[in-house]
Each structure stands twice: as C-alpha cells, then as structure tokens.
Image: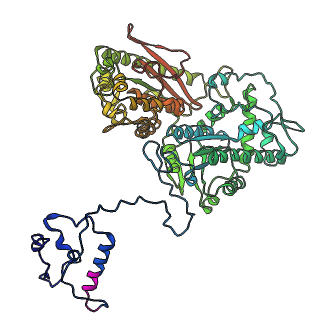
Amino acid sequence: MSHMIGSSATAPSSPSIRANGQRPIPGAHQFHDGLLPPAAASWSSALRDLNDFELSSHPTRPGFQQHYDSPYSRSIPSTAPGSPRIPPLRQNSGSHTPRVRPHATTLNIPGMTRSKASPDGRIPDRDVAAKLVIIMVGLPARGKSYITKKIQRYLSWQQHNTKIFNVGNRRRLAAGVANSGSGSPTSATNRGVDVPTQAATILLNGTKGPDIMVEDEPTKLDLNGEPKPRTKIDQSAKFFDPNNEIAAKLREQVALDTLDELLAYLLHGGGAVGILDATNSTIKRRKLLVDHVKAREPKLGILFIESICHDQNLLEANMRLKLSGPDYKDKDPIKSLADFKERVKAYESAYEPLGKWEEDMHLQYIQMIDVGRKLVHHRLKGFLSGGIASYLTTFNLSPRQIWITRHGQSQDNQLQKLGGDSELTERGHCYGLALYNFMTYKRKEWLIEQKNKIAQSTFPPLPGDNTPPYPELNQELEDKNFCVWTSMLQRSVQTAEYFDADDDYDVKAWEMLNELNAGSFEGMTYEEIAQRYPEEYRKRSQDKLQYIYPGVGGEGYLQVISRLRDMVREIERITDHLLIIGHRSVCRVLMAYFMDLTRDDIADLDVPLGILYAIEPKPYGIEFHAYKYNEEQGWFDELPNYKPRKTVDRNG
C-alpha cells in the first residue's frame, strides 16, 4: 500500500493493480498521510460504495460494471459537521414483548456490584428469583434456632435484608400462652433479653404451667386479639402427638400463617431472605409449604436446611437450653426434661428426614449433622444458597474467647490525621505492653473458670445454674492456642510486639485487617476535608455506610464488609482464643457482626482508642464484656453494663 499512501488526493485517479490481481477497496487511497476519510461522508454513502465495490469485484454478477475511479473522488466533499450520536433507546431485542423470561440472578454484593435495578448492590425487588425462602427441618433440640440466628446475623451483616419467622412463637401467641414479645432465647424477636438471667429463673417449684387454649375451629383464630377459649388442651407433650387432630390443625394453620408473613416480607417488605423456623418434620408438611410458596410466587427460591444431631453431649446441651425457654419457664427442670423428651418422641414417631422426595422434586437442601461436623448438599442454586452452605461449614461450639481492640496511639492519631502508616507514640507502646499483660492474665483466669464449670455442672440443671454447657467443654482445654491477628500497618503490628516476643502466642498480620482507605483524603484531618471539600464532607455525613472516599484505592464501609467476609468465616471456624488488633472501621464492622447491629449503627459505632471488647460465643448467642485502658495503672478496668453507642468524638 506504499504507492497508495504516497498518492495525492488531488491527482487524477487511475486504475491500481496489485500483484495478486485484486483491486483495492474503493476509497482506500483516500487514507493518505494517515488521515481518515472526510467527516462529511455519510453512512449511507459508505454502504453504497461498499455495495458498488462488491458488485465490481464479481463480473459474473448482475449489475457488474468496470470501475476505475473511486466513488469518493467523484463526490463533492462537504464541510458540514458529522451527524450527532443517537443515544440508545429503551428496547427489547428478544422474541417476546414485554419480556417474560426472568432476569439473571447473578451475585449481588452491596458496595461491590451496581446495576440499574440495584444501584446499591442489594437484591432488587424485581429479581424475585434471587430471593430465598429457607425452611428449617429437624426434631426439637437439634439447634435449629441457633443455626437460624447465625444465618440471619451473617446475611444481615452483609446487608441482605433477612428475618426469622418462628412458628413456635406464633403458636404460643395463638394459643394464648405468650404475648408477641415472648420467644426463645435465640429468637430474633427477643433482642435485649438477658438470657443468663432468664435461665436463672429455673426453680424447683413444681408450678404447673398455663393450659393451652385454642378455638374449636383453628382457621378462625384472631392472632391480634384476645383469645376466646372454648377447648382446653394440655400444653405438655400430648399437644405434639401426631394423633392429636385438634392440635395438628392448629399447628398446620399457624405454620401457614407464619409462612404468609414471611412471603409478604419478601414480596412486599423489601426482604431478601426469610427463614421459617419450625420442625417441618414430615413430607406432608414440607409439601404443603412448598405448594403454598409456589402458588404465591413460583419464582421464589426454596432452600431446606435440616439439622441432625447424633452426639449425645450436643443433645444434652440443647435440651438443657430448651429448659430455659418459654415452654418450660419457671417450671421444675426435672419434670420439664421428662416432658420435653416425650415431646421429642412424639415427633420422632412421624419424622421423615430430607431425601428422596426433595430430590425427585429437584429441591435444594442442606443437611447439617452435629452442627457443622458434616454437611450434605443437594442441587444448590444461586449465590445466597452457596454462601450459606459455605458459612455453615465454619460452625463450631468450642468454648473460646474473641478479643477486639484498636492499636495503641499512633503519631497520626496525635495529629488527628486519617489513614497513613505512622508508627506508635511512646504511649502507644505502653498500651501494647498493658494489653499483653492483661491478656496473659485473662487467659489463665478463663482456664480456671472453665475447669470449675466442668466440675460443678449437673444435668438436669440445679437452681441458679444459669449457663448451658458447651457440648465440647470436656476436651483438653490446655491445648487451646491463643492467636493474635494484626493488620499490615505499623501501628497495629507494633501494638502486638510483646505478643510476638512470646512463643506461647501465634501472631499473624492480615492485609484484609488494614484500615479503610481514605483515597485522596489520606493524611488529612476531618477539618481540612470540611474546608477544602465541603461537598464530599456533606455526602459522607449524610450516608457514611454507602459513602466511598474519592481517589485511587478509596474505600467505604461496604467495601470493608466485603473484604472481611472471609475473615469472619475464619473467626467462626477456629477453636482457639483470638485477639484482633485492628483499626476503627475494621473494629466497627467486626463488632457489628458479633453484636448483630443494624446497618444504621455500623458506621457510627463508638470504638475509641483504649477500649477492649471481649466476646465469648455461647450456645444461645454471645457473652459480651468491655474494658477500658487505665493508663496510670497500666491495666484494664471492666465497664459494667456497657452497651454499644454512637460515636461522640470522631477523632477519638
């Protein structure tokens, strides 16, 4: 093409012959001196020229004519500007209008994905197929409520709206035994209940509990009004006998009413996941629930999760916890235990585990044996089901402590600067020494307490014995390690320097524990940001959770949640003690997970320097303590009745 590049646009055109005998593309010689064709050349003209060229290239075709002159050389150049770009118009290129195929249900991660239907990354109401109905299955005292609570806490922490719908709570309400505020210690609706205090009310008083009162016709129950008793049914194990037809009708109706609440939450209440917490122990009941969901919205996903327990220590711990629940509150624990075992036998007589029916119906399910020691999956579909299955593999009931604190004071803390990688001040190093001494003391104290609990534990529990036992408490406690995790920033690593010098601690630095990256605002103070970038300061003040710092590497709280997802799973998996020396945003996000805080609380949680949080997982939830650094004494003082609160000093 060298002879074409060197040709002049004003020279008379002449036939060009190539070595292979092919003619050049018409207008190709116009690309002289590296220039593009004139802007005035229209699309229609270009298409017509290409058509003419194709005809001229095939002498046997009709309409073939010999051309030696370029079409561009015969046209009059125009100096008019090119046609404006036509913006895309809303359309449907499919075969149906309007679209009938459901939209793709791919991964949604708040803060990490964004679409027209979901600007914030949450599951949009349009994508019904991405939402999930979780139906629990299992005999009583198999840890179903424990599992549902943890799933709800994990998904809510990831900003997926999740809610538990407990059939037992609604059954008690319908029967007039409890008001709407009552629930089991692990119930999502029972926030704020002091579970150890509740368990301490177990007394050997032999008081007979209230009788269950139901309507003659269960379908006429008014759950919002005062019950009008007509038929009296004993609330003992007889109520759960499969041959008790009146009670069976009540249980079935209550299950469907609770499911209707769940479906309303998913379809009209902005929910992403609804969890139906009940035994659902027969194929007949599960078929009834599936048909009810499909009749309401066939695109909704359904996931069965069955909890199976073979370990007798685990069953004992679960039964002990049940004795402090609403069905046996303030009753003789020995008689309560006998009645509860009769209730379990009533369920066992008709129990049908997940299996062939679910597989024939192509339903997805997870079987969880002994709270995570073994899992069986079937036809899991969707990112929520896969994520839940992965999370369930991390469960363990080993007694341990999880400690969370910020690093010691850094040089940038003194200057009230954001981010950076400054070293500790002398006060910061002293904090690290005090933290090491205090942790070493508490580690020994915890070991003595656990051994005392083993020696004093009884089953059934005695009056005042208010802590359900760990099913794995009898393992060798001396073998428990103590891990110390830091970020890769100097101020965090240096705070752990005394732990690192002690071979009895396992210290590791994690990049995912690094402080939230402030992007272009790294090294600035809040006052400087407010003065120089008032609009950015205003945007962050209005929505700190969704806000992302501008500039390369800038993050927001949703990004921190996303990168800590694997960290949380690892914390749940390990059986050793753990101390995390992090930063304010990281500590806020981790505390929000363990404390089950709402999304409105995460970004404003008060996590000042010098505060140490202790979290001890329990079969019913967590035990929480907070300690404040006493700089004068080089020690930590416990803060009694400490409650999470909003930040008072943003530079703290």
Please state which of residues 604 and 574 is positioned toward the viewer in this rendering: 604
Relative to 132, say whether 605 is above or below: above
Residue 299 locus on image (x, y percent): 60, 57
Q: In which quarter of the view is residue 581 placed?
A: top left
- Looking at the image, how many numbered discs can be counted on the residues? 0
Q: Is residue 543 visible?
A: yes
Q: Is residue 269 left or right of residue 577?
A: right
Quadrant, the C terminus: top left
Against 93, is 284 above or below? above
Taking depth in this image into account, of 600 and 42 the one nearest to the observer is 42
Quarter residue 97 falls in: bottom right
- Residue at image x 29%, y 61%? 81
* Residue 78 rendering spot, x and y as whole percentages: 26, 67
Figure coloring: rainbow
Whether 479 is among the magenta residues is no
Quadrant the N terminus occupies: bottom left
Q: Is residue 530 left or right of residue 245?
A: left
Q: Is residue 393 above or below residue 56?
A: above
Depth check, front residue: 365 or 229: 229
In magenta segment, residue 54: yes
| Residue 359, quarter of the rendered image | bottom right
> Between 626 and 119, which is closer to the camera in this rendering?
119
In percent of the image, x 31 and y 77: which residue is there?
48
What x and y, as percent, mark residue 351?
A: 70, 50
Residues in magenta, as a range: 52-60
Residue at the right extreme of this rendering:
230
